[in-house]
Image (cartoon, helix red, strand yellow):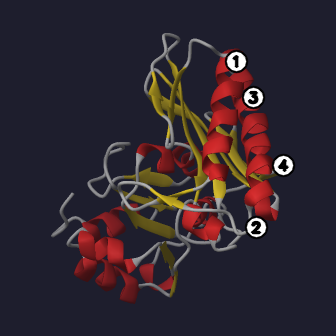
Amino acid sequence: MNADWRTRYDAGIEAAQKAGELAMQWFDADVAVQWKADESPVTIADQSSEKLLRETLLSHFPNDGFLGEEYGAQPGTSGYRWIIDPIDGTRSFVRGVPLWGTLVGLEYQEELIAGICCIPAIKQTYRALRGDGAYRDSRRIRVSDVADLSHAHLYYSSIGWFKKANAEANFLSLYHQTERQRGFGDFYGFVLVAQGAGDVMVEHGVHAWDIAALIPIVEEAGGKMTAWDGTIDLERPDVIATNGVLHDKILAHLAAGFSR
């Protein structure tokens, strides 16, 4: 195992958990909400947690690059880049729903090598390092082996996103062929696929910081996570995660008729 990868991975886990603990100070506490230009919410918890992550990680690794949702990009020279979302699921956070997470992804030479997803309100941490497997806390996790759509559990965030992408009909066709469907939005549907609790997570409207931490977790658990055209592209707004077995079937449903 690459020692530099491991050192950063361990530091990322510790930083994510501390940032999540900090955000808990404002959770379920009638926190003030501001609205950004894209009509997404932001709170002092988002801002404070990102500052903690940025200061902590860059104090240990000052030559690393950094991209955060709230304070943007900072270039680096080491070949490493941290990609973080201090609170993924701010809409849940501000309404007292415990399914929000602190996401920390790590790239090396543009390859995603590690991902951490800390869920402070339910005291769980999902994590993965390339070549080391995926874990929920200390328990190794793995995707399901479901191979038939009629037995699959499908997760998604909001049908409204598919309507905006001109893919509502495609999504609903897929929806009706699966056994169960649940609206586990944001990061949560992805980690459920990674642990084998679900088989497919389909999403639209994401940014790099929403998915960078999740790709290593899903892939190290044996699954597959791509854009709707089958590529891995952090700049695309569309993404799916599956157990791998179902991936091509899902792509076929989504491939026609959507717009970026």
Drawn side of residue 87 relative to residue 98, left or right? left
Which of pointers 2 and 3 lies earlier in the amino acid sequence?
A: 3
Q: Amino acid at mark 3?
A: Ala
| Residue that badge 2 annotates | 29
Labelled pair 2, 3 in contact (Cβ < 8 Å): no
| Residue that badge 1 annotates | 59
Q: Report the front residue among 254 and 23.
A: 23
Q: Is residue 114 above or below residue 97?
A: above
How many residues crowd around disc 4 within 10 Å: few (fewer than 14), some, or many (20 or more)? few
Q: Position of residue 102 (x, y in %)?
A: 65, 49
Element at badge 1?
helix
Marks 2 and 3, how far apart at CA? 29 Å
Labelled pair 1, 4 in contact (Cβ < 8 Å): no
Quadrant of image for the C terminus: bottom left
Residue 42 lies in quadrant: bottom right
Drawn side of residue 142 relative to residue 81, left or right? right
> Residue, x 24% and y 68% (percent of image)?
165
Labelled pair 1, 3 in contact (Cβ < 8 Å): no
Q: Amino acid at mark 1?
A: Ser
Residue 138, labelled with which disc? Answer: 4
Which of pointers 4 and 3 lies earlier in the amino acid sequence?
A: 3
Q: Report the front residue among 15 and 153.
A: 15
Q: Nearer the viewer, mark 4 or mark 3?
A: 3
Q: Amino acid at mark 4?
A: Ser
> Residue, x 79% and y 64% (percent of image)?
122
> Residue, x 22% and y 64% (percent of image)?
255
Residue 11, labelled with which disc? Answer: 3
Marks 1 and 4, how far apart at CA? 27 Å
